[in-house]
Image (cartoon, rainbow, N blue to C red):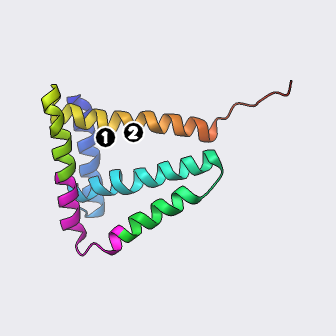
């Protein structure tokens, strides 16, 4: 778990240095903007409609539009997310394990399922 956490942290720090966004801002951009938009795109592709990505884009855009300071907003949302991950301490987890499971492993599984359904559909033979 520690290795996966460290690798993820290093990737986010690299993106931070590359873009000029803070570590917390990059976290919010990845987990609250890029991942939801990509999942909406994949779900729309699976079900052959555009509603989910449009609604997701509108919600994210309105949130950002009414956010006076993205840094303050990102710090606040990151801290709430970290508190959520730390809340699993009561069931024997810790911040690192919870982060890897909830923020890395579960999204990878969801991506695997969505990509498989969106791009690797089985051909149904007529019988």
For mark 2, does the 10 Å Cα neighbourhood hold few (<14), some (14 to 19), or many (20 or more) residues? some
Dots 1, 2 in contact, CB < 8 A: yes
Q: Is residue 89 left or right of residue 124?
A: left
Q: Tell me, yes or no, whether the highlighted magenta stretch contains residue 105.
A: no
Which residue is found at the position 27% from the left and 34% from the top?
100
Farthest-out residue, right: 127
For mark 1, does the 10 Å Cα neighbourhood hold few (<14), some (14 to 19), or many (20 or more) residues? some
Q: Tell me, yes or no, whether the highlighted magenta stretch contains residue 72.
A: yes
Decide which of 79, 25 is in the foreground and name it.
Answer: 79
CA–CA distance in space, label 1 to label 2: 6 Å
Image location (x, y in percent) of residue 96: 19, 34
* Res 2 label: none
Q: Is residue 66 left or right of residue 89?
A: right
Q: Is residue 32 left or right of residue 124?
A: left
Which residue is found at the position 24% from the left and 38% from the top?
99
66 versus 46 height, above or below: below
Image location (x, y in percent) of residue 9: 23, 43
Which residue is found at the position 86% from the left and 24% from the top?
127
Residue tagged 2:
107
Decide which of 127, 111 is in the foreground and name it.
Answer: 127
Which residue is found at the position 16% from the left and 38% from the top?
87
Q: Main secondary structure of the magenta part?
A: helix
The secondary structure type at the circle numbered 2 is helix
Image location (x, y in percent) of residue 40: 50, 52
Tell me the magenta residue range: 63-79
Residue tagged 1:
103
Q: Is residue 53 left or right of residue 74?
A: right
Image location (x, y in percent) of residue 118: 61, 41
Mark count:
2
The secondary structure type at the circle numbered 1 is helix
């Amino acid at each position: 778990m520690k290795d996966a956490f460290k690798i993820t942290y290093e990737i986010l720090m690299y993106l931070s240095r590359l873009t000029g966004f803070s570590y917390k801002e990059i976290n919010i951009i990845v987990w609250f903007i890029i991942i939801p938009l990509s999942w909406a795109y994949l779900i729309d592709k699976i079900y052959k409609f555009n509603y989910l990505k449009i609604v997701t884009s509108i919600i994210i855009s309105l949130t950002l539009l009414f956010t006076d300071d993205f840094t303050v907003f990102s710090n606040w949302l990151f801290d709430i997310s970290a508190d959520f991950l730390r809340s699993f301490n009561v069931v024997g987890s810790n911040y690192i394990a919870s982060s890897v499971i909830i923020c890395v492993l579960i999204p990878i599984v969801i991506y695997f399922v969505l990509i498989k359904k969106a791009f690797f559909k089985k051909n149904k033979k007529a019988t």
